[in-house]
Amino acid sequence: MTTLYYKGICGRLLQTLAILLLLGVYSGGVSANAPIEKGGVFIIKLNDDGGTLPLLQVDEAMAITFPDGMILNFMGMDEEAASAEIHREAHESYNIESINYIAPTGLINIAILGDIQNPGKYPFPNDSLLTSLNSYHSFFDDTDVDADFTLIRSSQHIKVSAEKSAQWQLEADDAVLISLREKVREKTVDPQNQQGSDQEISPQSDLENNQSAGIEAPASVTPVNEEESIPEATEPELADPGVPDPEVADASDVEVDMSAVRKKDPVHYQLQSGDILVIGLPGEEGFNTNFLIGRDGTIHLPEIGQLKIAGLTLRAADKAIYTALSDVFLGLDKLTIHLREKRLLINVLGFVNEPGEVELPSTGNIQMAITEAGGFVDGAQLNKLQLRRDGKKTVFNFKRYLDTGDPSVLPEIKSLDEIFVPTSPGLSSVHGEPRAVDNKAVDSVSDRTVIKVFGEVLKPVSFPFEEGINVVDALLKGGGVTRYANVEQIRVLSGLEPKMFNLKQFLESGKDEDLPILDPGATIFVAQQVDSVSGGARKVYVMGQVQNPGAFETSEGVGFLDVIANSGGPTQYADIRSVRLLKSDGTVVPFNFQAFTEGRISGFPAIDSGDAVFFPEKGPESDQSWIKLKTSGSLKILGAIKKPGRYEWAPSVDFMDYLSNAGGPTNNADLAHVKIIRPGPNDERNVIEFNMQEFIEIGGAWSDMPELTGGTTIVIPELPENPTSNKSTWLKLPKENAIYLMGAVAKPGRFAFNEEMGFLDLISAAEGPSAEADLSKIRVIHRNKRAPKVSKLDLVRYFETGDDTLLPEVKPGDAIFFPSSERRWVEKDPEDTVRIMGAVYVAGRYDFTNNMTILDLLAEAQGPKETAYIEKILIVNSSCCENRSTTFDLMDFMKDPDPSRLPVLRAGDTVFVPELTQSYWHIIMERVADAATILTVIQFLWNLGWITP
């Protein structure tokens, strides 16, 4: 009992000493000349109850980054010099009271999970408490919410409320799950008015209080006050090892990129395609919403168009967006930009259920991308997945990751990466069961690099080539040799020359030089040890296009047909008219097996020990046996194919096999509209269409290929030629596959169209618009809707902005019309024109654009005449809600050419330039001239005496 008592006292003394040493670190106990190290942190306390800044960690460049983006570098400095540098550079931005530096040895890394923006591992001082998490790093706003914690330690999940968080001290390798809830408000009584009021109960968040609380906090998982019992909700809960917790991950499994932790402030994050920004500008339509950074690294801003910001930090993007908007918008002092979500855009192609583009969170990996794409398709080759980025290809073994769980096997992914999943011709490293061919799981003919093992092995096999594979590895793939195998004479065909491998010698010597390494496409044949089977036995070899090639034991009375039957007989690809019997003495005996089956010849060639029977492969150009086949036993391939004709039908041969055997499609084949004509009941013909182009470029399941039966006809149409050079060809094109292009284009007509083409492709096919085309008033008639719809296109604006969203979506059956700019004025809409009349040289009706002024209109009319009264030009506006008129003094404008004094000109306006004779001064002068004439006549009559006073 006494020993236990002294042990308890010593333990508490050591604990108190450790806490005092840590406090000494905070108060500058570490030598002021301690050098600054990578991974260390600075604790900066502010004056005037400003609290403390989040921990500033020294990065790989020996620098720290302040919350406002300021960066200070401490390369080669000690603590004293670094503190002086902070005081000198940051005193204008921060009212600093004290600076403390903690070396990496005084820190522990804690995994923080839950309701925070950037989960990950963060550094904390050794004696940190749960209540101090938000003081050292800003995980949540503690003015509005309280945090409950789940402490994960040694597979235990311990729930801790916000009120009890100051009683729990953190340890290395801990993980903390944060759950946020609204602050609890309780009624308190005001002694003055005896009325209840709401008062917030907030957690202890000040750094000094946390540190003072740390003096009493133990270094274990038990509370400080031993007399205070732990509520049931805070008792340790042992995790069931068999059932993973659905809400909390094991701290040991948390992998965090510390560079991302150091730059968790979004200001220093480099934007990439897939990220989502929120741009706010009060009072402006089109803002205050989400803006997605597209694959080209741009966002589309209202009135501005595309702006590339991928690769910029948020601060640099803020400046670029502000600069772009300043030419158009006012009030940009209220512009707000923040990063809402970090996303990755990944293309997943190949043998997956849903190939295409997927979106992942910033922490996504290759397995998440494949899951988003629907998972693997049966037959996917997992050991040769490809990651393509910037034209470079990285091959990695996903199966090894599934076998070991080692994340280092998988390469990291970035936005715009492409993951390709290939198909495997063999059983090795395959997801699910591969597609069967002739009731076999392997089609070694489809890949010339596969390794083939047959003969006296337990399981003949073909499997994909792997770098560095040797003969023993290949034999193990086949299950090993049988007890009848001749292990001293294993035939290996690898590379240019055949070799003999002595397995017995290798097992006795163990030398690497006795074990050959295989090349791609190697063939291994294990012959039978005849002498060990029975005395006097013979062996005969059967090779070529037979079901089971190999060496076979014979005896007296066994003839040619018996040997062929043991090999399973010839395959459908065998040329049975040209069978060759290779005698052991070197002579060759030809034999027409087909003539024998037809009764045209009788008898078989004699076969002896050591002979070999060879069945060659037949070629479609030399095989005329199809003439004797019934229609139900053949298949026809017509159209744009290199070797059209009639081929023998077999249920084990699929669509792609037949096209390959026919030489493949020609260059002008329309692969998007392949027709499959199959016989039906009652002499009917069923026609289906197969989009082979989409299958080749995008991929899909093998079951998507059309099913073929005897009597089927495959028609591959040709693409239509230029309609101006061959009318008969494009007229055959169905209207549902064509688009009509008319008007002011170089070569109007009817053009083939598929989903891969766009609007600009069609314009290029018509060799572009003609010289008189009005590119600002293009019309697209959408006829594939329930009701016809017409959309307008200003192609001039597209070429000025490059905004692809201006281009309409066209589909087969639509019509595109290019109007001519030389239309008569009576054919133009009044709202698209402006009139000018009066004393101008060319009065009339002119096309109106939004940037046209009255000076432009006068120039179009070749200017006013010499007799024009330009001081009183009349503008009559009738395009708005009411008619009104204004006057414009051109003479006065010429004296002071201020553009702001020009009258506003709108579509539908009328401009009238009066004659000088219609001015008030001219009328007055005419009246004065008339009065002077009358006075002159009176004076003349007076002088003659004809009138008297």
Image: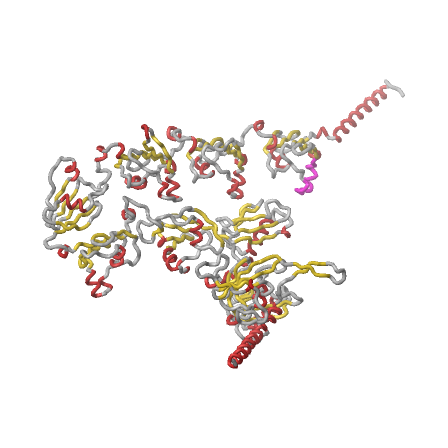
Q: Is residue 860 magenta?
A: no
Q: Residue 673: which quarter of the image?
A: top left
Q: Is residue 816 visible?
A: no
Relative image position of residue 303 (x, y in whole percent): 58, 44
Specify the farthest residue to the top. 946
Q: Is residue 773 above or below residue 106?
A: above
Q: Is residue 792 above or below residue 801?
A: above
Q: Is residue 562 above or below residue 135?
A: above
The quarter of the picture where the C terminus appears is top right
Q: Residue 313: which quarter of the image?
A: bottom right
Specify the farthest residue to the bottom. 2
Q: Is residue 887 left or right of residue 213?
A: right
Q: Is residue 183 left or right of residue 924?
A: left
Relative image position of residue 937 (x, y in whole percent): 81, 22
Colour scheme shown? secondary structure
Q: Main secondary structure of the magenta part?
A: helix
How many marks the image carries: the answer is: 0
Q: Is residue 453 left or right of residue 582?
A: right
Return the residue nearer the eye: 810 or 322: 810
Q: Is residue 620 visible?
A: yes
Return the residue nearer the eye: 338 or 558: 558
Q: Which residues are magenta?
A: 887-901
Specify the farthest residue to the front. 1
Q: Is residue 368 above or below residue 878?
A: below
Q: Is residue 891 magenta?
A: yes
Relative image position of residue 540 (x, y in whole percent): 14, 49
Relative image position of residue 685 (x, y in whole percent): 34, 30
